[in-house]
Structure formats: C-alpha cells, structure tokens
Image: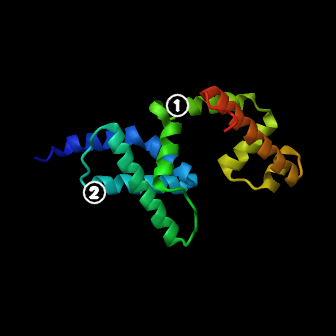
Amino acid sequence: MALPPRLQAVQIERLVLDHQGALLRYLRFLGCDETLAQDLAQDTFVATIEADFEIRDRKATSAYLRTTARNFYFMWLRKTRREVTLPEEDVLESAWHEHERDDDGDTYRRALRNCLAKLGDRARLALKLRYGENASREEIGFATGMEPEGAKTLLRRAKEKLRECIRKQVGEDPQV
C-alpha cells in the first residue's frame, strides 16, 4: 500500500537530510569537484526517488546511494571522455568505511579543523586557495608573496603536516 504523498515528501526530505553530507563527501572522495559533486548527488537522489527505493537501515541506504552516485560519476566520465583510474569497488568501500567510521567522518573533520588551526597563516591561505577556490600555483604564489615553485612547496609541506597531524589525532599509525 502506497504511503500518503505528504508522508512520502517527509521521507524524501529525511533521506536527503540524513545522507546528503556523506554522499557529497563520497563524491569528492572519488575525485569530483564541488559543482560536479552537487550535480551528481542531486541526480542520485532523483533517481533513488524515481526508483521507488525502499528506505531501509542507514547502512544499506548509504551503500545504495554511494553505488548509484558512483555509477553516475562513471557515466559522466564516459560522456566527457575523461579517464580516471580508481581502485576496485571493494577497495573504495573499505577505504570509505575506514574514514567515515561510525560517526559519518566527524572524527576526521574535527581533526582537520584542529590541524588547520595549527598551520601558519600563509599555509592555510594557500590550502584555501587551492582546494577551496581551485587557484593555480601562480595565483597562490601571488596571494602569498611567493614564486609559483615556492607555492608548490608550501602546499606540499602543508599537506604533509596536515596528514601527519590528522593521523595522530585519529589514532592512525603515521608511518602507513
């Protein structure tokens, strides 16, 4: 028996609220930029709703949404004739679960915020420009008062410091 339309709308809203953040993070994890991740997440939710997907437990629903989103990403790659080499699905899923843990990745995001605060202003600015605004090395160099090669080195060192700091905060072996 079909649910009344109002209840279905509430279920759809709950589905999106419960899973949108993790789905966007997953698409970024696969390599999508922010705009593409937003588009593919929307396509994923629309396809899920149109398929009359039966909402089950959180884990099963998340897996279904990730699979659907991954398929949309692969279709986009084929359509745009882009080649991206990704690990096998089981390796992707394993890495995803390891980093999302039982808290939807809150541990890693909290560690990232803490570690970003420990970086110098110039390193934070360089990271913000590169990953927040997709700035080139030349643009980053100009903004930080460095040559492009210096900006490249600054970014590499900042990423290394972040990686080591995050691993320490979440209890991973930094030698891995």
Q: Nearer the viewer, residue 57 or 123?
A: 57
Locate the C terminus by quadrant: top right
Q: Which residue is mark 1?
A: 106
Give how far apart the Cα atoms at labels 2 and 1 are.
31 Å
Q: Position of residue 154 (x, y in %)?
A: 82, 44
Instruction: Check disc 2: other Cα within 10 Å, few if <14, some if 14-19, many if 20+.
Output: few
Q: Position of residue 171 (x, y in %)?
A: 61, 27
* Mark 1: amino acid: Asp
Location of residue 148 (image quadrant): bottom right
The residue positioned 49% from the left and 52% from the top of the image is 38
Query: Given contact means CB atoms under 8 Å apart, are the residues at marks 2 and 1 in contact?
Result: no
26 lies above or below 73: above
Q: Position of residue 90 (x, y in %)?
A: 46, 51
Q: How is the image coloured?
A: rainbow
Which label is found at residue 15? none
* Mark 2: amino acid: Glu
123 lies above or below 32: above
Q: Indicate the secondary structure of the residue bearing disc 2.
A: helix
Tag in front: 2 or 1: 1
Q: Position of residue 122 (x, y in %)?
A: 81, 38
N-term mark: 2 or 1 = 2
Q: Which residue is mark 2?
A: 50
Instruction: Check disc 1: other Cα within 10 Å, few if <14, some if 14-19, many if 20+.
Output: few
